[in-house]
């Protein structure tokens, strides 16, 4: 058996799980105590070993170890990420290309929307009639009426939940 089984039984007795000396019962010896002990015996034979002395700092701080850097990296010591210059130039070129591409696409989209409202034909259909203010206003007012009716009905159902119903 392991060395701490008796200590575990003593802890069970201390916490009112057992009401007798479990270790003495298992080994067939005379009980060391009857009922719940105030403090179970120590699992150590003899004196308790001392705790190791830990080296604690006097002030709560982080001390970073300084490592010697090669000569080429000493000038960029304060940078967190040390990227070579070719990566910086490549990123700049890609970013500039993306900006130019986005401007080109924005201009073509602007021209397409402008032509749409002027009434130019697209694939044989004249689309400018769909974007008249009166059509948009009628559509929005119909949708608003539907939403208003629905929300009014739901509000009445909600209010009826709190009315007292007397038989």
Image (cartoon, helix red, strand yellow):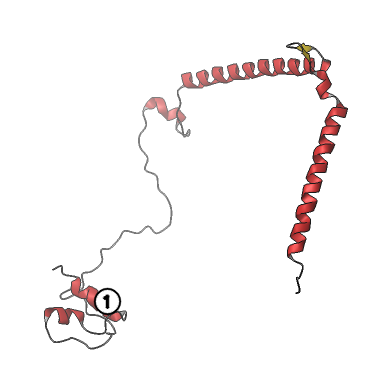
Which image quarter: residue 8? bottom left
Question: In this rendering, would 152 be left or right of 34?
Answer: right
State the residue lying farthest toward the right.
Answer: 134
**Residue 68 in the image, given as x and y percentages of width and height:** 35, 34
Which image quarter: residue 161? bottom right
Residue drawn at (75%, 58%) of the image: 157
Where does the N terminus fall, quadrant-wise? bottom left
**Residue 39 in the image, given as x and y percentages of width and height:** 27, 82
The crowd level at tag 1 (other Cα within 10 Å; few <14, some 14-19, many 20+) is: some
Compared with 150, 15 (above or below) is below
Where does the C terminus fall, quadrant-wise? bottom right
Dot 1: element = helix
State the residue lying farthest toward the front.
Answer: 167
**Residue 70 in the image, given as x and y percentages of width and height:** 36, 28
Near-viewer residue (70 or 107)? 107
Is residue 43 visible in the rendered structure shown here? no
Near-viewer residue (158 or 30)? 158
Q: How many marks?
A: 1
**Residue 41 in the image, given as x and y percentages of width and height:** 22, 80
State the residue lying farthest toward the bottom.
Answer: 34
Residue drawn at (39%, 44%) of the image: 64
Residue designated by label 1: 11
Residue drawn at (20%, 69%) of the image: 49
Is residue 122 visible in the rendered structure shown here? yes
Compared with 32, 153 (above or below) is above
Compared with 92, 13 (above or below) is below
């Amino acid at each position: 058996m392991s060395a701490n089984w008796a200590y575990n039984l003593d802890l069970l007795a201390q916490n009112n799980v057992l009401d007798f000396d479990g270790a003495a019962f298992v080994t067939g010896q005379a009980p060391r105590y009857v009922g719940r002990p105030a403090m179970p015996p120590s699992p150590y034979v003899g004196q308790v070993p001392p705790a190791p002395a830990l080296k604690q700092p006097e002030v709560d701080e982080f001390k970073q170890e300084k490592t010697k850097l090669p000569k080429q990296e000493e000038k960029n010591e304060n940078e967190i990420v040390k990227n070579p210059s070719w990566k910086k130039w490549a990123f700049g070129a890609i970013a500039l290309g993306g900006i130019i591409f986005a401007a080109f696409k924005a201009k073509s989209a602007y021209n397409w929307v402008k032509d749409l409202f002027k009434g130019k034909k697209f694939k044989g259909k004249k689309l400018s009639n769909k974007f008249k203010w009166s059509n948009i206003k009628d559509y929005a007012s119909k949708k608003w009426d539907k939403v208003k009716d629905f929300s009014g009905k739901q509000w009445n159902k909600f209010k009826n939940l709190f009315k007292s119903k007397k038989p």
